[in-house]
Amino acid sequence: ADPVLGVEMASTGEVACFGASKEEAFLKALLSTNFKLPDKNILISVEAALQDQFTHSAWQLHEMGYKLFATRKTAAVLEKNRVPCEVVAYPTDTDPSEPKADDLIRQGEINLVINVPTHKSTKLQENYIMRRTAVDFGVPLLTNMQLVEMFADSLYKHKQEGLVGLDPKTLFEHYTQEQDKDAWTSPSEFH
């Protein structure tokens, strides 16, 4: 099955989290789903219509010290906008001069896959193989541009400003740490 969520699945399994900012709440929500924040290498393949929009997020990821790997067309846009990246081949490419995206995922070289297709995508099989390989090898996968932008903004803020309290807790754990003075109800009410 293709791991891109359609409209009918995008709101299934939602996670709600508290945070001092939307970025903190967003990262908590991701972490509570066992999403692993990337250590060093990120693979990127973004549909041409979204590449310019993605450039800011790519720059943020680069500034945080991540090494970016991108498919040819995505890499061309990033390099045009002075975002350093290493070019990788699509899984079905036969050019031996560039490492193949799916091989890098299988070898454990990639810590996050950003693969954002649209209805205009022409590399359907190649994108599917990258997404499927990421899921099969337990590599976090982002497939939605708004999610990618929020992820980059949140991670950037976390690394630059040091968001606190990113350890996810259940609602009951949150309540056990609450003092009576913090509650908006009386101490005799269940909350």
Image (spheres, rainbow, N blue to C red):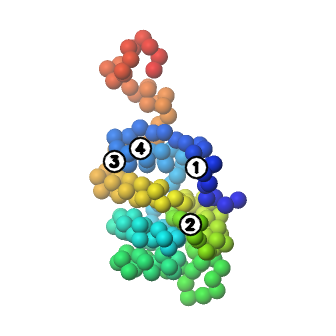
What kind of element bears circle 3?
loop
* Mark 2 or mark 3, whichever is nearer to me: 2
Total of numbered circles in the picture? 4
Q: Which mark is residue 117?
A: 2
Q: Which mark is residue 44?
A: none
Dot 4 or dot 3: first in sequence order is 4
Q: Residue under circle 3?
A: 163
Q: CA distance from mark 1 to mark 2?
A: 15 Å
Dot 2 or dot 3: first in sequence order is 2
Q: CA distance from mark 2 to mark 3?
A: 31 Å
Label 2: how many residues lie within 10 Å, few (<14), some (14-19) or many (20+)? Answer: many
Where is residue 133 drawn, in percent x and y? 64, 66
Q: Residue furthest top?
A: 188
Report the residue at 60% width, 78% height from top. 90
Label 1: how many residues lie within 10 Å, few (<14), some (14-19) or many (20+)? Answer: few
Report the residue at 38% width, 48% height from top. 23
Q: Which mark is residue 10?
A: 1
* Mark 3 or mark 1, whichever is nearer to me: 1
* Mark 4 or mark 3, whichever is nearer to me: 4
Q: Residue furthest right?
A: 1
Q: CA distance from mark 4 to mark 2?
A: 26 Å
Q: Which mark is residue 25?
A: 4
